[in-house]
Amino acid sequence: MTLDLALYGPPGSGKGTQAERLRDRFGIPHISTGDILRAEIAAKTDLGRQAKAIVDRGDLVSDEIMIPIVKARLAQKDCEPGFILDGFPRTIPQAEGLDRALEEMGRSFDRVIYLEVPVPELVERLSDRWLCPKCGRTYGKRAEAPADGNRCRVDGAELTQREDDRPEAAQRRIDVYLRETLPVLGHYRPVGIVADVDGTGPIDAVTERVLAALGDLIPPSPSGRAEGGRP
Ligand code: ADP
């Protein structure tokens, strides 16, 4: 049995946070195309150089570049028991390309989890997201204040913002999401695999809702509660 999942939702909806929790719980890889691109940019590879300006201003990298990257990643051995895609597919051509790739592999999505968060809250969340460049920890100043002078509580490094979380790029990402990405949900709805999950409120509460939306895919424990472990 495999568990092939996609986390879907606007920028700032908490896909990355929830994907990491699912990864730890089910032992399947979290594949974030945003993380893949940021790693390429940091390593200054050819792809990174091409992508940097596009990502920083909040636009999408082309489908011709993204589809082969994800195909190659899904073919790796650690994806055999399943995967959690985060940030892909983001356009209809990406969804079609992915459908073909999965079909060739003899598999298909088990569930697309749609994290719903109202737009005004997204803008607030993105402009309040701060990163420690040293340990990678993220802070939302309203939820958890950093140490004095905007420093990481763990190692004291000065916190920074993602280039594309600055207000102009963040607003652009939300616009691009509404125009290019939201229609992808309509591609999967007729297949009957979309689960709508309320993405507002505490992180733990959202995780509970996500697990409930996967309930029938997770083998029940002897007590009758959803087990959560991999078979
Ligand atoms: P978020 O979902 O919070 O906007 P991500 O970390 O998923 O951020 O992605 C950051 C940026 O990386 C996007 O704004 C876009 O420029 C680029 N990107 C990520 N995934 C894709 C994709 N599937 N297709 C095109 N561009 C992508």
Image (cartoon, rainbow, N blue to C red):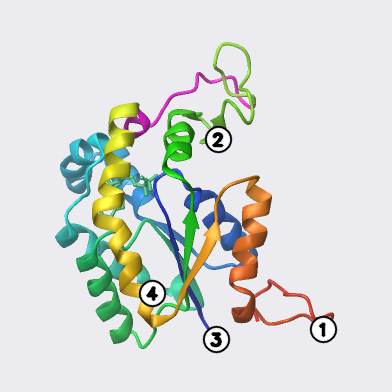
Q: How crowded is mark 1: few (under 14 residues within 10 Å), some or many (20 or more)?
A: few
Residue span colored magenta: 154-166
Q: Evaluate whether residue 75 shows in this view.
A: no
Q: Distance between the residues labelled 2 and 4?
A: 35 Å
Tell whether 116 sits left or right of 54: right
Q: Evaluate whether residue 38 shows in this view.
A: yes
> Which residue is identified by label 2?
137
Q: Residues within 10 Å of mark 4 (few under 14, many from 20)?
A: few
The image shows residue 183 at horizontal and vertical percentages of 28, 63
Tell whether 218 sits left or right of 58: right
Q: Which residue is drawn at 60% across and 27% down?
A: 142
> Which residue is identified by label 3?
1
Q: How crowded is mark 3: few (under 14 residues within 10 Å), some or many (20 or more)?
A: few
> Which residue is identified by label 1?
222
* Mark in front: 3 vs 1: 1
Quarter-of-image position of residue 69:
bottom left
Name the secondary structure under disc 4.
helix
Ligand 1 contact, mark 3 (Cβ < 8 Å): no
Q: Which of marks 1 and 2 is nearer the N terminus?
A: 2
> Which residue is identified by label 4?
189
The image shows residue 102 at horizontal and vertical percentages of 33, 80
Q: What residue type is labelled 3?
A: Met
Q: How crowded is mark 2: few (under 14 residues within 10 Å), some or many (20 or more)?
A: few
**Magenta residue check for 28:** no
* Mark in front: 3 vs 4: 4
Q: Earlier in the sequence, mark 3 or mark 1?
A: 3
Q: How far apart are marks 1 and 2 (CA)?
A: 37 Å
Name the secondary structure under disc 3.
loop
Q: Which amino acid does label 1 sit on?
A: Pro
